[in-house]
Amino acid sequence: MLRKKVIHFYLVLGLFAVYLINGLIAIPNNSVTYDEMDHWSYAKRVLMRKPEKVDLFNDATAMPVSAFNAIPRAVEQLFNPDLRKKDSGFSDIMHGRYITLIICLLTGFFIYRWSKDLFGETGAILSLFLFVFCPNLNGHGILLTTDAYAALFTVTVSYFFWKFIKRSGWKYFLAFSISLGMAQVAKYSLIHLFIIFGLVSLFVLLKRKTLLSGWKRNFARLAALSVIVLLLINAAYLFNKPGKKLNDLEVYSNTLSQLKSSFLGSIPLPLPLPYIQGLDITMYMNDLGPGDPRVSWQIYLLGEKRSGPGVGFWNYYLVVFIFKTPLSVLVLLLAAMLFLFLRKKRQGHPSTMLFIIGMIIYFLLVFGFSNNVQIGLRHAIMVYPLLYVLSGFIVTLPFVQIRSKVFIPLLALYSLVSYYIFFPNLLSYTNELIVNKRDAYKLIADSNIDFGQDEFIVEKYLKNNPDVQVAGAEPKKGKFVIGVNDYLDLDGSHKYAWIGKFNTTSRVGYAHLLINVTEEDLKN
């Protein structure tokens, strides 16, 4: 027994070490992506005690949690007060990425902890293994954005809520409340957690018949939750001008405009001004829709481009999820859903598994209906920690236990091969449903394939192939390399419309295409 515990401990330690090593290798091999500069700029200002939204559109989705990523620069400045950099913040972004990598270890810890509580040590190892070799979580877990934080706080909120439901008491309720408050300063989309856990809480109270009989306790908990969440939001924004009324503000979004015209417009809001402004502009950008230069490029799915208000694909996140999730994990998700129908009495954790599956489906479908600016699976990346916790159930099945010496090694081998084919540039990952990776752009694009992370690869390729050049606006013969998004003309500028008429011949990395244009091609 002692030997098994020692082996288990070192196996867990080894997996976390591999995660860190992979991240340390990947960070310097991925160029600065499109959004990181905006997040870095705001993170720096928060540390300087200036959380105001200066540029409403660029600052809209930037959140205070990114201030953690500015700590390396703050330490540098502390030891060298006269430090002035001339690289526009690129080195600071690279250094800030290491903070995201370290913080995201917590995501792996909670995946492991929850899976162990549910499915034992073997299930926990499987869940942790899938996290360590998840191309999506690892791809975004090295960036200076808020997507990885969204994944972390979704799993912590869910885990502590589950512990609270199982054991009750104030300990886990306070942990749940704090996590929920932290989630609100990590990503505006995590407001949906209030809807999810509000509905689940109502269901639990009705099932236990304590909604009315325990109203005093329920009210006290709701009051405590509200105070904690509001306190954390205000603290994150350094208590910057709370108590503003909507009537006193210039609002842009349809939602806040309607609230402003109602009686709520005259009520002081217990929220800091920058939080309200960011939320308002984020919703306004959603109202404007993709294709507006202040918002995003056109959205793209299965060869179709869309732009304008209310044009989102209802199945966007579900379709992209299918193409960007390792096939083994998709099979485990389907197996979990099937298990709920075929399980024997008292087998497994049906209520918890249904809860996790419900959250995954909620994010993949509700986001498709509510979010018009669909520019990547990263908006729904919070489904992956939940999915890996859920995947641990498979080791509890007798069928798998009997064949574990074959099943587990095959699963591990597939995960490793699928992961390292794309490593260290994991943002472009697609599973084997897309056989020819050069043609991935025919189905999905934007940050799913090209988030600006492959510039180092292109630079190296051009250096080794002097006969190749970057595509420009002027039609001419030669060999050209062009990013997927430019080739598809997602920005609508038609700058590269001429080269978009030619078929690709190969790819450079996974986010750029190679095109050979002859004199005859130009004439035709």
Image: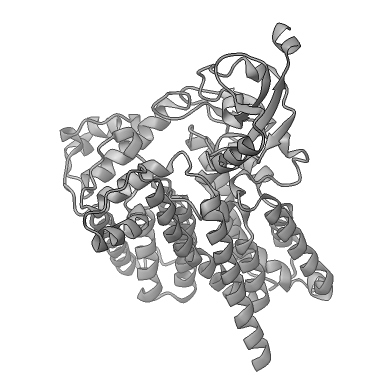
| 214 up-or-down from 249: above or below | below
Residue 407 % position (x, y): 81, 67
Q: Hey, which quadrant is residue 164 in on the image? A: bottom left
Outermost residue, bottom direction?
2
Q: Quadrant of the N terminus?
A: bottom right
Of residues 35 and 267, which is closer to you in this image? 35
Q: Quadrant of the C terminus?
A: top right
**Which residue is drawn at the image coordinates 57% and 14% (left, top)?**
474
Colour scheme employed for the rendering of this structure = one colour
Of residues 399 and 304, which is closer to you in this image? 304
Residue 456 % position (x, y): 56, 43
Residue 97 % position (x, y): 44, 55
Q: Is residue 119 left or right of residue 39?
A: right
| 477 up-or-down from 434: above or below | above
Q: Is residue 223 left or right of residue 394?
A: left
Residue 113 % position (x, y): 54, 73
